[in-house]
Image: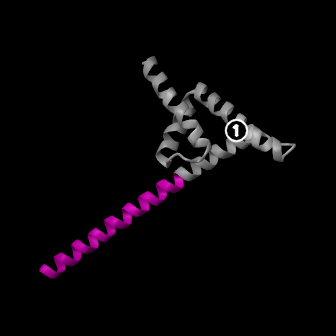
Amino acid sequence: MKDERKVDCKKIERMIPRYLDNKLSVYEMQVMLDHMRECKNCKEELTIQYMVSEGLNKAEVENDYNLLQSLENKINDSYKQIKSHDFLYFGFVFCIIAIVCLVIGSVVTIIL
């Protein structure tokens, strides 16, 4: 069991740079963030990589910034993006089902 978790952690750690560059799919983002809720080591790795990448960028622009709050904002924005994606997906599925029902209803009415 412990070995499986390490494999998952290695996979998650490889996803972090793409997450920081906003290049993960919504599904990958959800997998990564769900894993980090349970894994302090991966969350710490995200924090370190974020501080290095954003810290260097922000140090050039701002004198006063809070990187930990900035990372939490990014994570919260990611969860909002996931929820929005899920809402749109279920709305799309609902519309398809409604259209199929209307078509079937129309065909049945024409036949009868």
Q: Residue at x 51, y 27 (%)?
A: 10
Coordinates of residue 47 in the picture (x, y in percent): 67, 33
* Label 1, residues with CA under 10 Å away: few <14, some 14-19, many ≥20: some
Q: For residue 100, what is the image quadrant? A: bottom left
- Residue 104 magenta-highlighted: yes
Q: Would you name the residue on which mark 1 appears?
A: 53
Q: Is residue 106 left or right of residue 112?
A: right
Position of the C terminus by quadrant: bottom left
Q: Residue at x 57, y 33 (%)?
A: 37
Instruction: Decide which of 31, 96 is in the foreground and name it.
Output: 31
The colour scheme of the drawn protein is: one colour
Coordinates of residue 9 in the picture (x, y in percent): 51, 27
Furthest-left residue in view?
A: 112
Furthest-top residue in view?
A: 2
Q: Which residues are magenta?
A: 83-112
Position of the N terminus by quadrant: top left
Coordinates of residue 86 in the picture (x, y in percent): 47, 54
- Residue 87 magenta-highlighted: yes
Instruction: Decide which of 15, 101 is in the foreground and name it.
Output: 15
Q: Is residue 85 left or right of residue 95?
A: right
In the image, is residue 1 above or below residue 18?
Answer: above
Q: Residue at x 72, y 35 (%)?
A: 51
Q: For residue 107, what is the image quadrant? A: bottom left
